[in-house]
Amino acid sequence: MSTIELTNKAKDYREIMAMIKELQDEADAIKAAITAEMERTGDDIVQAGIFTVKWTEYTTSRIDATAFKTALPELAQQFTKSSTAKRFQVA
C-alpha cells in the first residue's frame, strides 16, 4: 500500500470513527430520554408500538480484585495472569 493510500485509509478511518461517536452520542441521548420517562412514570417495562422497552434492575457479583490483592497478596499473585495485546490508534 502506498503512502497516499495509507494516508487516505487513515483519514477515512478517523472520519468513520467520528461518525460512530456522533451516532453513539445521539443513541445515548435517546436512551436517556426514554429511561427518564420510564423513571418518571415508574414503569420498568413499556409497550411502545411494536417495541417492548425494558429498564430493569439486576444484580451481578464479581470478585473485588483490589480487596483480594490487599487481603491475600500471595494468593492473588498465584491467580493473576498477564496478557499482551496490541492497540490500534490513528493520531
Image (cartoon, rainbow, N blue to C red):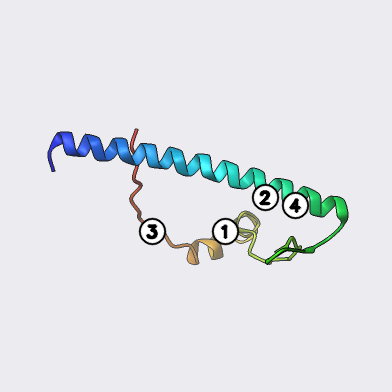
- Which of the two discs, 2 and 1, sits closer to the camera? 2
Which residue lies under the disc numbered 3? 83
**Farthest right residue?**
41
**Residue 69 in the image: x percent, y percent?**
59, 57
Vertical relation: 6 (above or below) 57: above
**Residue 31 in the image: x percent, y percent?**
67, 50
Contact check, label 2 and label 4, Cβ < 8 Å: yes
Which residue lies under the disc numbered 4? 35
Which element type, helix, strand or loop, lies under badge 3? loop
- Which of the two discs, 1 and 3, sits closer to the camera? 3
Which image quarter is the N terminus in?
top left
**Farthest front residue?**
49
Q: Count how many numbered circles sit on residues in the image.
A: 4
User: Between marks 1 and 4, how big is the CA–CA gap?
Assistant: 42 Å
Kindly identify the residue that appears in the image at 24 percent across and 36 percent down: 8
**Mark 3 packing: few (<14 Cα in 10 Å), some, or many (20+)?**
few
Q: Earlier in the sequence, mark 2 or mark 1?
A: 2
Q: Amino acid at mark 3?
A: Ser
Q: Earlier in the sequence, mark 4 or mark 3?
A: 4
Q: Earlier in the sequence, mark 2 or mark 3?
A: 2
Q: Name the disc covering residue 73, or none.
A: 1
Q: Earlier in the sequence, mark 1 or mark 4?
A: 4
**Residue 57 in the image: x percent, y percent?**
76, 63
**Mark 2 packing: few (<14 Cα in 10 Å), some, or many (20+)?**
few
- Which of the two discs, 1 and 4, sits closer to the camera? 4
User: Between marks 2 and 3, how big is the CA–CA gap?
Assistant: 35 Å
Kindly identify the residue that appears in the image at 28 percent across and 38 percent down: 10
Which residue lies under the disc numbered 2? 31
Q: Amino acid at mark 1?
A: Pro
Which element type, helix, strand or loop, lies under badge 2? helix
